[in-house]
Amino acid sequence: MIKFISKVLLILLCFLQSCKDEDAIRYREFSSSFENVNEFSSFYIVPQGNYDSYHELVNEAAIDGQFSHKAWIIQARDTCNDGATYLPHRAYPTIQFHKTKEGAFKTPCLISLWVKLQMSLQAKGSGRIDDWFSFATLSPDASDNWARTVLINLTPDGYLKLVHVPNQGEQIRNFQASYTNDISGDLLFPQNEWVRLDIYIDFNTQNGYAKVWQNQNLVSAAKVNGGNELLQQAHFGLYASAAINEGSIYNDKLRIKEVANEAEALQLIKTLY
């Protein structure tokens, strides 16, 4: 009987260890406080000045550690944002999970990031494309085409928005903070100060969706179609429309974490401050 009980306990311990190992593999995490450029050396990094923008690690502002990633615009790339050629500003390192030994992250994932933006965005009017700034680009596509993306953008009205939802090229959301439901303006994006962004992304093939929180307040939510269960690559830093002629963005304390569901993500958002 003792031998039998010992055998059962051994099997149980092995099972529990196996579950623990599987969880460790399943719930992967990538984090960076932008202390060393070598963290991104195996990924594509936008060359300096290629898009009339520059970026580097600086010690002039930081949330965690000594450095943060700073990117800034040198000059406008066009007089408008809807010219014959697409000329956005770009200055960022990419994070390409498909190039790592472990491969793509499995969604759902929670992406948390501190940002500090100083940039004036203008409404162009007369059917033209307004200025925009993009804080994050998330893609289930492992190719250089980034054919399917979900973006988190700021527009001249001052609110963060999910873009390319539910399908590529569409802007249809289930919830969006705006002047109509935020009379006090509490959900307007505050410029020139550190802001915490939390992004929940699920590239589920049937029921994908995304949500964005600004300083723990929900500001945008939408369905996401065209997913493949995976987060293959992402970029943060500076990505902005062509007509903007100046401005800067700091990024710090980035974390991308696989989670079981939105409930776990919400708990992390509450406890990570």
Image (tube, rainbow, N blue to C red):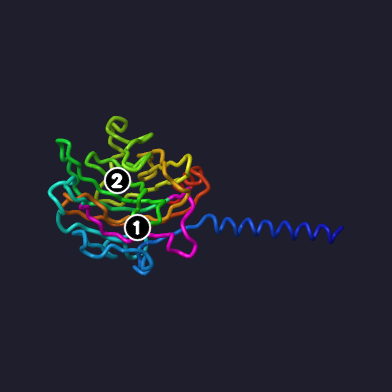
Position of residue 58 relative to residue 155, above or below, is: below
Residue lying at 63% horizontally and 55% vertically, measured from the top left:
19
Numbered mark located on residue 144 in the image: 1
Q: Position of residue 250 (x, y in %)?
A: 28, 57
Q: Where is residue 120 in the image (x, y as percent from the top left)?
A: 18, 47
Q: Name the residue under label 2.
A: 153
Q: Foreground mark, 1 or 2?
A: 1
Report crowding for label 1: few under 14, some 14 to 19, many 20 or more residues within 10 A (C-alpha).
Answer: few
Q: Is mark 2 on a helix, strand or loop?
A: strand
Query: Mark 2 belongs to which amino acid?
Result: Asn
Position of residue 125 relative to residue 147, above or below, is: above
Residue lying at 83% horizontally and 58% vertically, measured from the top left:
4
Quadrant (top left, top right, bottom left, bottom right) of the N terminus = bottom right
Q: Is mark 1 on a helix, strand or loop?
A: loop
Residue 90: say if magenta.
yes
Q: Position of residue 16 (x, y in %)?
A: 67, 56
Question: What span is colored magenta in the figure?
Answer: 87-110
Query: Mark 1 belongs to which amino acid?
Result: Asp
Residue 34: say if magenta.
no
Spatial CA distance of label 1 from label 2 is 21 Å
The answer to which of marks 1 and 2 sits earlier in the sequence is 1
